[in-house]
Image (cartoon, rainbow, N blue to C red):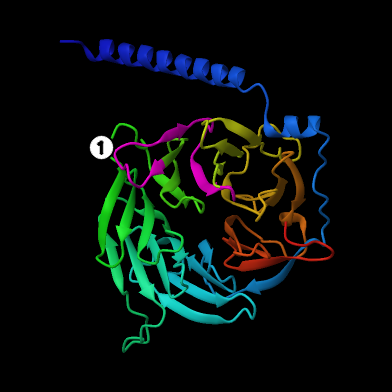
Amino acid sequence: MSTVAELKERHIAATETLNSLRERLKERRLQLLDTDVASYARAQGKTPVSFGPTDLVCCRILQGHTGKVYSLDWTPEKNRIVSASQDGRLIVWNALTSQKTHAIKLPCAWVMTCAFSPNGQSVACGGLDSMCSIFNLSTPLDKDGNLPVSRTLSGHKGYVSSCQYVPDNDSHLITGSGDQTCGLWDITTGLRTSVFGGEFQSGHTADVLSVSINGSNTRMFVSGSCDATARLWDTRVASRAVRTFYGHEGDVNSVKFFPDGNRFGTGSDDGTCRLFDIRTGHQLQVYPPHQQNGDNNTPNPNVTSIAFSISGRLLFASYSNGDCFVWDTLLAEVVLNLGTLQNSHEARVSCLGLAADGSALCTGSWDTSLKIWAFGGHRTVI
């Protein structure tokens, strides 16, 4: 029998070996990445998108939540938004008038995510109750004036961190969970038809925080996790991830497909956003953290949420310090910080999303408000 001291020594030695292998892997990856998108674009003579403070302006402030806003989603027809808050409510807003069309009191107040169905008739949400609840917005209110749950999707063994309807399919959605798995659900039956990860070797090794479905090929989706990786999945092959993407050094809080479906972006606690190619598995670009006042000792603000413009030329990234950067995706330069503009948020920007036609950006914050930013001046949709 080994003594406790011997086991401890062996554990320390194994940890050191693992860390040195990690470093070697990192160095090897950097050697293989002989260039990135920005270096190539500069060599081609590309210049950054010109973006002035009047090109994206706050045109609406949505007030009604009494707690931190955690999640938001637009309807595909662009004029409505659903938001989820620490106050235990979902609010459906008319983005054009700022009016609330529904205020839904949730059975479990600890909500973390929300999503609109493709037809705009239902909303889904999930949180610490480990379930995904579906609400049909046309259902009559109950005797207490609340909208009843029309379907409950239960099966996860940990909190539901994210949910997204399969595009153009109102009966299926994908969830990500703190139980390290993702699930594909049939809303009509309430059954989970596939589990991605879990006991399978190629699954995530920590909580899943975000999912994004490929709009060009809805069988493919990507997930981001506390294990600092993103993984690509094919819904027809649940038993293994198609590919694992490394590079981040912190939780991957947000993943979002690029408009062409061949790439996706990530945002992480390490303060960076990254762009990956799903076909080669290569990291194409890093969007680095901005040092706060040149102070190297201050930890970088976390990236909380990301979205791409319609063309993919802009990457919107929200941060834990209240900043919201507009990056030129091609040149990896910040062309605007919404956090410095008039009417910016007063706390962490926790979520953001782009209207389906790309004409407006909505941000949600721990300051309890949502703000709609529209392209103004001479600027058209990019």
Q: Residue at x 54, y 80 (%)?
A: 100
Which residue is identified by label 1? 199
Report the side of 288 relative to 277 (left or right): right
> Is residue 9 positioned above or below 240 on the image?
above
Q: Residue furthest left?
A: 1
Q: Quadrant of residue 181?
A: top left
Task: Say which amino acid is labelled 1.
Answer: Glu
> Is residue 80 positioned above or below 46 on the image?
below
Secondary structure, mark 1, is loop
The one of 145 and 13 positioned closer to us in this rendering: 145
Residue 247 percent location from the top left of the image? 54, 30
Report the side of 118 relative to 375 (left or right): left
Q: Is residue 270 visible?
A: no
Residue 137 among magenta residues: no
> Is residue 276 positioned above or below 344 on the image?
above
Residue 247 among magenta residues: yes
**Range of the magenta residues?**
233-260
Residue 366 percent location from the top left of the image? 56, 60
Q: Quadrant of the C terminus?
A: bottom right
Q: Quadrant of residue 193?
A: bottom left
Residue 295 percent location from the top left of the image? 72, 35
The one of 9 and 152 positioned closer to us in this rendering: 152
